[in-house]
Image (cartoon, rainbow, N blue to C red):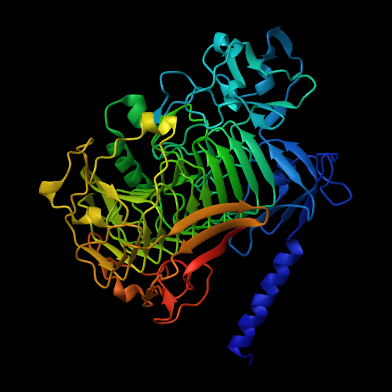
Amino acid sequence: MMNIKVFFFLAGISALVSFSAFAGEYHVFVNGSDDAVGSAGHPFKTISEAARVARAGDTITVHAGTYRERVDPLFGGSSHLNRILYRSAEGEKVVIKGSEVVKGWKKVRNEVWKLTLDNAFFGDYNPYREIIAADWFRDFGRDHHTGEVYLNGKSLYEIDSLEKVIDPLPLKGAQDQEGSLYQWYCESDSKTTTIWANFHGSDPNKELVEINVRPAVFFPKNTGIDYITVSGFTMSQAATTWAPPTSEQTGLIGPNWSKGWIIENNTISHSKCTGISLGKDRSTGQNYSSVYKKKSGHISQLEVVFRAIRNGWSKENVGSHIVRNNSISDCEQTGICGDMGAIFSQIHGNHIYDIYVKRQWGGFEMGGIKLHAPIDVSIKNNCIHNTFKGMWIDWQAQGIRISGNLMYDNSWMDIHLEVSHGPHIVDNNCFLSDLNLWNLAVGSAYINNLFAGQICEGGESERFTPYHYPHSTKVAGVHTLQSGDDRFINNIFIKTPAPPYDIFEKANRWKRKEGTMDYGLGMYDLHPAEQPESDFPIWEMSKVKLPVKAENNLYLNGAIAAKNGVNELVDKNADTDIRIEEKQDGIYLILKLSEDFPGMESKTINSFDLGEAMVPGVIFDNPDGHPVMFNRDFFQKSREENLNSVGPFRDLGSGERSFKVWEK
């Protein structure tokens, strides 16, 4: 009689052989034909045709060239081991665009040219008739379209009148003042669309001029298209719309409320709003607050959560994505966004930059990464700079771990934690912008971080937000934010000269009252009677009500220690200098400590040192329920008990040190 272990082993081998026997590889080439069979010798012409025929286990290999299409996968895989793989051919550059090249421009006046197109050119989606309007969006008093105009790959700026295009002025909010003089304007009726653009000396009929025509580049129209891998493409120029947490969230690329996608090694740029969306679908609500104007956005979002639960929102049905090693830039809302659809996902090793740099609108969703309900999400080893908010982690951020990230030159702040109850783990990060942390959440553990900017702390007395059972989407209750219940252990705080606000920030940033933020942890010690009056009474700044633990932290250049901290070291005489240098081979952090720097060793800690997040009553553990061991530094070097420095780097000594913190 056959041994039962041998039987199952042979059965497994047989299953793998069966998968291999039925798995196929389809090829796509720009000079192919969609009437071909898709073989290497007879390739398809479009990726969409390959997507029509591919099934679980198949591979779609796309060869060099530019493909102008929206890839709408009709089928997905059946598991992580039996997925559909879309990949660029090895060593070949494959570009997928949501735009089309346009010719036939006619000169009107000065450097302004005009193009009129029949609306049939756009098919069933005309971005020059689609007005951006949704919950949490601020239009600044004018219309914005999802369309865009590009000159040699660089996007122009939409403006609201032809007169302004003819005599352009630099736009107040734009980072690139000279670039903002390249402007366009459109008018559209039921038959035609006309675009006027100021190309400043360039002939648009001789240069590469493209316009957005598709709402996405790689995004299924249907939900539940699971287990797809998208690897190695350059994707750009999508007419995406605003993606708030209370509507369908479309990105240039995304799984559309599916499970188990891998988005890796891609270059993603020039989405009108969002680059990668891991967000919610349309069925749970579509901008009810702004459309019906009966309920606040807060209530509408609560309703979205409970509709999603009724519709099967769970680990079994959605999330568990891997987004890794992508370059994401030039998106005017977010690099990565998602409400509820990102649960149990990994966002690792991405370079996210130049997000929300035109600044022609406002709202409450802009950032390098903006996630709602990121339950058990890992955000690790990303480099995020020149964004509005580096990370904005909002609502139901339970079990999230933010580890080993490099963040600098983010115009408002590096990380904003909002109306969540924990547990959140924030460890081994380098926070280097003017404002490092806006902490409007409770139940956080900050371990071995470098804070070289200010910290702002606050509470929230009116919005009730959900918390969950451990490692689950099931709601255990709702609660307001009292502020506190935080742990700061083994961190470095450095007071650095704050740069002046830029024009946009000075006009639009909420005023920071003295006492609501500081370098270090001094703001946690203010008694309620000492609090400055808040500009926003709903968001009660610095009225700490729950206990805060500060232990074994180092304070330099005048950063303020917590009064009740344990084993805290304040080096008032430290002449510390810190800066970022961008070089050809990578990004370097230069840290100069005084020659007589005393140093400070840290103890190695784990989950058991952190207790429970008070509101949900949940411990700080890994998604699999095992304890977290904080025994690695920023570079994944092993930490040993009492033999390593505080902060993200295990080895920290006096004098000047150069750390290569990002590899190009």
Q: Considering depth in this image, is 504 or 573 the residue closer to the camera?
A: 573
Q: Indicate left or right for 134 with 329 as reference.
A: left
| Residue lying at 71% horizontally and 28% vertically, measured from the top left | 100
In this rendering, is residue 123 above or below 11?
above
Give the farthest residue toward the right. 41
The residue at the far left in this view is: 529
Judge left or right: residue 349 versus residue 510: right
Which residue: 74% across, 66% down?
A: 20
Along the viewing direction, whichever of 651 and 98 lies nearer the viewer: 651
529 to the left or right of 484: left
Disc count in the image? Answer: 0
In this orientation, does residue 404 appear?
Answer: no
State the residue in front, 240 or 206.
Answer: 206
In the picture as drawn, the residue positioned furthest to the top comes out as 109
Query: Does residue 663 lie above or below 154 as drawn?
Result: below
Horizontally, residue 157 falls left or right of residue 558, namely: right
Percent position of residue 118, x then y: 68, 14
Quick check: can you spot residue 474? yes
Quadrant, the N terminus? bottom right
Pick whichever, 5 or 239, lies toward us: 239
Q: Where is residue 648 in the image (x, y as percent from the top left)?
A: 45, 66
- Quarter containing the C terminus: bottom right
Where, by quadrant of the figure, is residue 13 drawn? bottom right
- Residue 469 in percent (x, y) is at 30, 61
Q: Which residue lies furthest to the bottom in this view?
A: 1
- The image quarter containing residue 366 is top left
Residue 466's x, y, as percent?
28, 51
